[in-house]
Each structure stands twice: as C-alpha cells, then as structure tokens.
Amino acid sequence: DTGVSQDPRHKITKRGQNVTFRCDPISEHNRLYWYRQTLGQGPEFLTYFQNEAQLEKSRLLSDRFSAERPKGSFSTLEIQRTEQGDSAMYLCASSSVQGASGNTIYFGEGSWLTVV
Amino acid sequence: AQKITQTQPGMFVQEKEAVTLDCTYDTSDPSYGLFWYKQPSSGEMIFLIYQGSYDQQNATEGRYSLNFQKARKSANLVISASQLGDSAMYFCAMRRPSGGYNKLIFGAGTRLAVHP
C-alpha cells in the first residue's frame, strides 16, 4: 500500500501527558499537511511542510503543539501537556507539486486522540 | 474570507437512486479548486472529485459528478445509482491559493445514509 499512513490509529492518554503522532506520506510527495477534526466538524488546517520546511502554522497550533519533518520524509506531531480539548482526530495528508495529482491532497486514516 | 457551506446535516436515499449533496462557497479569488471527500466511519478522507474554477465542463468520476454553477458559487455533488457502501460523511472543500500550495477549507459535512 502506498497511501498516507499514520501511527498510532488510536491513543488514549491522561491529561498532562505528552503524545506524538507519526505520518508517512505518499512517497515522492513533497508537501505534507496536518489537520485536526473534532466530532461533527470538517477538518481544520494546522500546519504545512514543503520538504523539510514548515511554511505555515495555523493559530490553532498553540505552543504546546510542535510538528517536524526531518529529511523531508515522515512527519511527527507532538502535543505536550495534553488537555481534554485536544481530543480529536489528527489527519495527515500529502500532495505533489506537479501533474494532475498536484491538484489533489491525499489523506491518511487519521489518529484518534482521547484525553481523559 | 473563504468559506464553505453545507446546509444538509443529513440525507437519506434509497439504494440505486441518485442523490445530490449541496455545497456553496465564498471566495474573492478568481482561481480556486473545489473538492469532495468521503469519510466512512473508519476516518479516512477519500478523494472523490475535483473541479477547477476555470474548468469549462463539470467534473465526472464514475458515479460521481459535480454540478458546478460558478455564478451561484455552488458545487453540488451528484451520486448516481447509490450503493449501500456510499453511506458515509461527505465533505466539500475549497483549495485556498496561498503561497502556491493546496490548503483546504472544509465544510461541516453531510451524513448520507443509503437504505436498501
């Protein structure tokens, strides 16, 4: 399977703990995005990478959130000192620059986070 | 500001019938793209169809077609010959031109239930 993969798929954590999610984009896709989706809502943009450079961060991304994409391949999203309001699904997506597929963003299956 | 509106929280359709899911958008950019994604209960966002603002013809992909009415700023999804597996959340999204990359703004979604 060469789609976007995310790990873990589900995470339950206690308030105050740190969590990290990993995303492996479609190979050769140089653009990578993180979105957050809460129940009953559409996904909201969090941040964007082109290769290893983080080019945009949403105001939704508080200082407890940090995302990295070392070497321009996989990416990690870390949430420090989790709060119950962080409970959501975190979606990773990737796209390429050129060709017809450059119009399309492909999403992974998401990582569900529950903070108790 | 860019905005996507999906006014139908839920829709029901009989198997093998056609259904239209509504989407209106608001943007002042002349160049934009419109997407529809399907999200089953597993969480993955599955790309269905894309329409560019300058495309002369309505996009079609198998049983999916996009009824694009630019003057009315609407981009309704038509699913023909509904199948039980079409039951899912459907999201309309707009690509916001920003620094040359594809940042998507999503609507709140429509839950489609296909009845046998």
Image (cartoon, coloured by chain):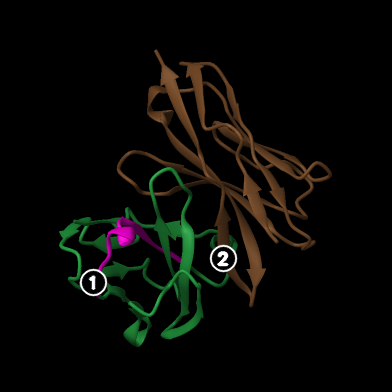
Chain colours: A green, B brown
Judge by depth and name the residue closer to the eye, B76 or A71: B76
Q: Position of residue A98 (x, y in %)?
A: 57, 71
Disc 1, SS: strand
Residue at figure coordinates x 41%, y 75% from the top left: A62
Give the left or right position of residue B74, taking residue B100 as reference: right
Query: Mark 1 highlights which residue?
Result: A20
What residue occupies the far right of the structure in this picture? B71
Query: Mark 2 highlights which residue?
Result: B103
Marks 2 and 1, Cα distance to the nearest angstrom? 23 Å
- In the drawing, what numbered circle is on residue B96? none
Q: Position of residue B28 (x, y in %)?
A: 79, 60
Q: Position of residue B54 (x, y in %)?
A: 78, 55
Q: Nearer the viewer, mark 2 or mark 1?
A: 1
Judge by depth and name the residue closer to the eye, B11 or A49: B11
Q: Note whether residue A43 is visible.
A: yes
Q: Amino acid at mark 1?
A: Thr
Range covered by the magenta-colored residues: A81-94
**Chain ID of residue with mark 2:** B
Within 10 Å of disc 1 (Cα), the crowding (few <14, some 14-19, many 20+) is: some
Q: Note whether residue A2 is visible.
A: no
Residue at figure coordinates x 54%, y 31% from the top left: B63
Asked if residue B15 is positioned above or below residue A13 in the image, the reply reads above
* Quarter occupied by the C terminus of chain B: top left
Q: Is residue A84 magenta?
A: yes
Q: Amino acid at mark 2?
A: Lys
